Image (cartoon, rainbow, N blue to C red):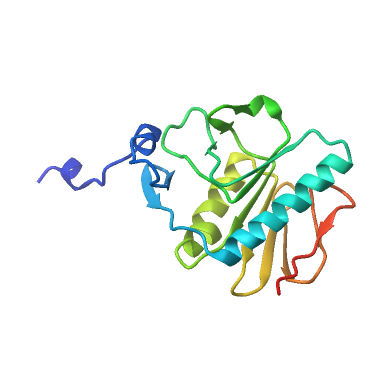
Amino acid sequence: MDAALNQPKIYTVKDIYALPDGKRAELIDGQIYDLAPPSRIHQKISMFLSNEISTYIKNNHGTCEVYAAPFAVFLDEKDDKTYIEPDISVICDLEKLDEKGCHGAPDWVIEIVSQTSKSRDYMIKLFKYRFAGVKEYWIVDPDKQSVMVYEFEKKIVERYDFGEDIPVGIYKGFSISIKMQ
């Protein structure tokens, strides 16, 4: 039997754009992953973090921009087999932005873990973001009430509990405390 017949189908960004309206998915290395609708706590955390980051940037006259999902990130412009919608993306090189999304690695990515995204967020995306050039990656886990912080350039990995001040690596002097009630 021909080995090519046993190969899984490799999808591209074209396939993502061909999905029916309202259908959300991510594409990682040619494989499509359906995105489940976010939970209420997921949205609450996303709104809180987006507001905190946006307010800090505005108050400090920063030029970086904050985008919450759904927002397209094409990690590698030469690769049409990866399309990701991070929960929060902070992009400081505005040349990477156009009407379709971000072309290249955001400076800071935050993923809020759900039951259906755990292995992707903790393993697959961790690897992809690190090698794409993301400077800082946060994995927020509402079930564990913790945040894993990866500062790739400094080779730092820290774990914080909700309620603790979490220093932001790309902004010296800025920290965030996630308090959920």
- Residue at 70 percent across and 50 percent down: it is 50
Question: Residue 95 at x, y = what percent?
Answer: 67, 24
Q: Examine the rendering and report whether any part of residue 139 can be seen.
A: no
Question: In the displayed structure, does residue 163 sit left or right of residue 3?
Answer: right
Residue 94 position (above or below residue 55): above
- Residue at 83 percent across and 57 percent down: it is 175
Question: Residue 144 at x, y = what percent?
Answer: 62, 75
Question: In the displayed structure, does residue 154 sit left or right of residue 35?
Answer: right
- Residue at 64 percent across and 40 percent down: it is 133
Residue 90 position (above or below residue 155): above
Q: Examine the rendering and report whether any part of residue 136 can be seen.
A: yes
Is the C terminus in the top left, top right, bottom left or bottom right quadrant?
bottom right
- The quadrant holding residue 7 is top left
Query: How many marks do you count on the picture?
Result: 0
Front residue of 109/87: it is 87
Residue 93 position (above or below residue 1): above
Q: Residue pushed farthest left? A: 1
Question: Residue 180 at x, y = what percent?
Answer: 71, 71
Front residue of 129/90: it is 90
